[in-house]
Amino acid sequence: MNKEFLAPIFVLSIICLFVTGILSVGDMVTRPIIVEASNRRAEEVRQEIMPNAEEFLPIRSEGMPNTITEAFATTNNVGHIFIVTTKGYGGNVVIMCGIDTNGKIIKTMTLAEKETKGISTPVFEMESEYTGKDKNLEGIDAVTGATITSNAYIGAVRDAFAAFEIVRGIG
């Protein structure tokens, strides 16, 4: 093999190693900052769901529905928060549901969804209608034209109640 063939390979390999090193250093520097910002934002959202809570402690109980991705209890016994991931029409629907110690919804909030804009929008606009409801969800019906998304949202809230009953020792 001649030098004309090997020289560019050697130079490109050195450049690749250098760039990889720079990217690794950049990742090491920014990763903790990103994780802290993410944790801070998650805490802000939990506080928005349950404003009277002092602190949130992560919990896990056997038997909770598989859709429960995270669960939190408040240190001052205000209630519990459940993050639920379920399948909608266009993909996963992720909601956060705060339930007080009396088994009433404090607030629900959509964290992520990939549903059809316009058609499923009414499902997410009616989040406030869940406030004050108990596990029976009386008065909550599927939205016409967005039945799959509606049923996914309602099912996610029901799963939050099922998890609530398990952590409270009711279920």
Image (cartoon, grey):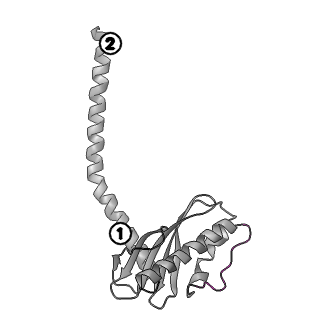
Give the distance between the C-alpha atoms of the residues marked 1 and 2, in whole angstroms. 53 Å
Secondary element at image label 1:
helix
Amino acid type of the residue tagged 2 in the rendering: Phe
Residue at 35 percent across and 67 percent down: it is 39
Q: Is residue 65 shown to the viewer in this render?
A: yes
> Callout 2 environment at 10 Å: few (<14), some (14 to 19), or many (20+)?
few
The disc, 1 or 2, on the residue closer to the chain's N-terminal end is 2
Q: Position of residue 134 (x, y in %)?
A: 56, 87
Q: Position of residue 26 (x, y in %)?
A: 29, 47
Residue 1 placement, left or right of 167? left
Per the rendered image, the range of residues in magenta is: 136-145
> Callout 1 environment at 10 Å: few (<14), some (14 to 19), or many (20+)?
few
Q: Which residue is mark 1?
A: 40
Residue at 69 percent across and 68 percent down: it is 147
Does the magenta segment cover residue 143?
Answer: yes
- Outermost residue on the right side: it is 144
Q: Is residue 51 shown to the viewer in this render?
A: no
Does the magenta segment cover residue 144?
Answer: yes
